[in-house]
Amino acid sequence: MQKIAIIGTGGISRAHIQGYLNFSDRCQIVALVDIYPEKAEEKKRQYRLNDAKVYSSHSDILSDKNIDVFDICTPPYVHAEIAIDALNAGKHVLCEKSITLNAKELEEAKQLAEENGVVLAEAMTIYHMPLYKKLQEVIRSGKLGKLCMAQMNFGSYKEYDMQNRFFNPNLAGGALLDIGVYAISFIRSFMSCTPDQVVSQVKFAPSGVDEQAGILLMNPAGEMATIALTLHAKQPKRGMLAFENGYVEIYDYPRAEKAVIAYTEDASQEVIECGSTKDALWYEVNDMEEAVSGAADEMHFDYTVDVMNVMTEIRKAWGLSYPEERESL
């Protein structure tokens, strides 16, 4: 039985908690941590986590040998600090996106995980949805031919308040780390190797973070991708993969359950439906539990590293850094 500590009990923690409750025979939530303990107490009551203890700091439970996994659901600007403390204490870590702010922080965390023999993983739903595992089977069959181009859109309409977490540099705001990480993770999961050419354009918000961006990627195999991100203009969460023999179109791709393949030769279409959007965190928690137990490793940490390297390179080009970064870019 794996013992879980939920670090941060804001909105995203609900899905994580529900995911673990689906595996009550294998996982047990034993700690809820929040700088506002009343929020943690509310989650404890809401989900009837009667055996879970509430704490105001993750430091209070680092030495608790009854805890196996830190599930970090805080805002990104404190991810690295908490993850590194947990890894130093010999805890497994599942961390919400973006897992750290930059590649140097992630490399430090990676080395600690290796030294301590524990699992470090990003809570990236794209790596765990059954639909994508099914699509990979279709691609490996060769019927679509080689990947040529990907096109990704993700646009949110966030209130134009420079103090909220989406636009506040002190909270690591901006489109790239909040929504761009989904698009780049999607692209990396289908590319045959990581992009080595990156160009972009950015529009900054008055606070100095990236409000919208256009990004172009290409890898040594000649596979290309374009990405359009907006934080103050709604776009469909649309992904398109163009292959030699057809294209694949997916909507709501962070937690997708349906894809449409259009074949070039005869203009026929194939609809693939697999998995369920509402169970996205269930799939994620299942894969993490298997990685910790040693049964399998479907966490795709290599993709996480590649994606963070790309995002760090992009922010370097923009000259955008955050006050909370442990090291300069």
Image (cartoon, helix red, strand yellow):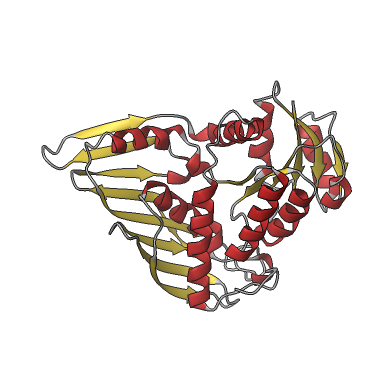
Q: Residue at coordinates 52% horizontally, 71% vertically from top-left?
A: 315
Quadrant where the C terminus is found in the figure: bottom right
User: For residue 26, which quarter of the picture?
Assistant: top right
Q: Residue at coordinates 62% horizontally, 63% vertically from top-left?
A: 101
User: For residue 28, which quarter of the picture?
Assistant: top right
Residue 64 spot, x, y in % from top left: 87, 40
Q: Nearer the viewer, residue 49 or 236?
A: 49
Residue 20 spot, x, y in % from top left: 67, 31
User: For residue 21, which quarter of the picture?
Assistant: top right
Q: Nearer the viewer, residue 210 or 299?
A: 299
Q: Is residue 231 at least partly visible in the picture?
A: no
Q: Nearer the viewer, residue 320 or 109?
A: 109
Q: Nearer the viewer, residue 31 or 224?
A: 224
Quadrant where the N terminus is found in the figure: top right
Q: Residue at coordinates 37% horizontally, 30% vertically from top-left?
A: 273
**Could you tell whether 292 is left or right of 222 in the image?**
right
From what the image shows, is residue 67 above or below residue 146? above
Farthest residue, direction left: 266
